Amino acid sequence: MMVQDRLQLRPLGKTGLTVSSLGLGCSHIASLSTRASASEIDELLETAWDNGVRFFDTADIYGQGDSERRLAGIAARDGAVICTKAGLAVSVSQTLVRMAKPVLRPMLLRMKKAGSVAASARQAAEAHELRPHLIVARLEASLKRLKREAVDVFLLHSPPRERMENEVLFELLEDIHAHGKARCVGVSCQTLADADWVLRQGRCNVLQVPLSARELPEVRGFLERAAEAGVGIIAREVLRGAPVESALPPLLRDPGVSTTLMGTINPKHLLQNIEIAGSVQ
C-alpha cells in the first residue's frame, strides 16, 4: 500500500469538509528566513499533495501574503481544503516588507540564526487588528491571492479573549459565512482555556488549538464537547520539544482531533511525518 493510500481522510466536525489527518502548516513557505527557493517550495507542496495531504493552513500575515500566493495552485484542486486567518498585523507595511525581500532575504540567510531573528522581529512588530471592516478587507485580499471566491476555513488569528467577549466578532464570523466568503468559520485560539471558552459560546464550527500529546488526557472533556457540538478541531504546536515519533501518533489516533498540523519546508521531514501518519491509521 502506498503512503498516499494510508493517509486517512476525516470529517472536519460537522462542517461537511473532509480533511487529511495530517495537515501542512504553511507559515514558513514564504518567510524572509526561508532558505528554500520558490521552485523547491513548489516541489514541497507537490510532494505533500502527491502523498495525500489535503489540508493546508496559512494566514494573510505569513510571508506578507506570499504564503497564500504560493498556495494558489493547490487551492484550485478538487479536494484541497485551505484554511486562512486574519486578525494579526505588523506595525510596518506588509507591502513594503514584501518589496524589500530581495534585499533583506540574502542578508538574513547569511546569519546563522536567521530563522530566530526573523521570528523575533515579526513577533515584536505584531499587533491585533480586529476591526470588522478591516478583517473583511483582509479576507477579500486573501481570496484574491488564493484565486478563490471563498476559502474553506476562515479563522480569527489568535484574538485576545477579552476582545472575543464582544459580540461583534462572533457576528462578523457569522456574516462572513452567510455571505459565502468561507465555508466554515472559527478561531485560532491562543490557549486551550481560550478554546474551551469559545466552544461554550456555540458560535463557531472550527477551532484551532495548541495541543500536545501529553495534554490529551486533561482536555478529554473539551474534545468530547467539541465532538458533540460538531466542531472540528485543528491541532497545532504539537511537538513542544518532543520527538516527532512520540508526539504525532497519539494526536493522529485521537478521534477528537480532525487534523494535526506540522510545519516544515524540508521534504525529508515532510515525508517522515507522512509515514508516521500512515503507520498509525
Image (tube, rainbow, N blue to C red):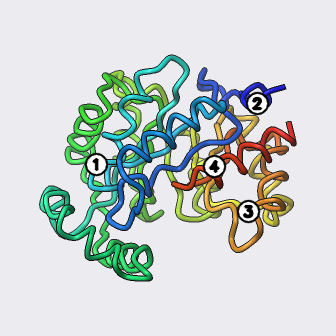
Marks 1 and 3, how far apart in space?
Answer: 28 Å
Which percent across, then down, holds residue 139?
29, 39
The residue lying at 73 percent from left, 62 percent from top is: 212
How crowded pointer 4 is (Cα within 10 Å; few <14, some 14-19, many 20+) is rated as some
Which of the two discs, 2 and 1, labels the residue nearer the N terminus?
A: 2
- Nearest to the eye among marks 3 and 2: give it: 2
Foreground residue, 164 or 266?
266
Residue located beneath label 1 in the image: 65
Q: Quadrant of residue 171?
A: top left
Q: CA distance from mark 3 to mark 4?
A: 19 Å
Instruction: Give the CA distance from mark 4 to mark 2.
Output: 16 Å
Q: 144 or 112, which lies in front?
A: 112
The disc label shown at residue 122, or none: none
Dots 4 and 1: beta carbons under 8 Å?
no
Question: Marks 3 and 2, how far apart in space?
Answer: 20 Å
Residue assigned mark 3: 212
Give the residue at mark 2. 8
The residue labelled by disc 4 is 270
Graded by Cα atoms within 10 Å as few (under 14), some (14 to 19) or many (20 or more), the crowding at tag 3 reads many
Residue at 78% x, 28% y is 2
| Residue 144 picture location, percent across and down | 24, 32
- Earlier along the polypeptide chain: callout 3 or callout 4? 3
* Residue type at numbered disc 1: Gly
Q: Nearer the viewer, mark 4 or mark 1?
A: 4
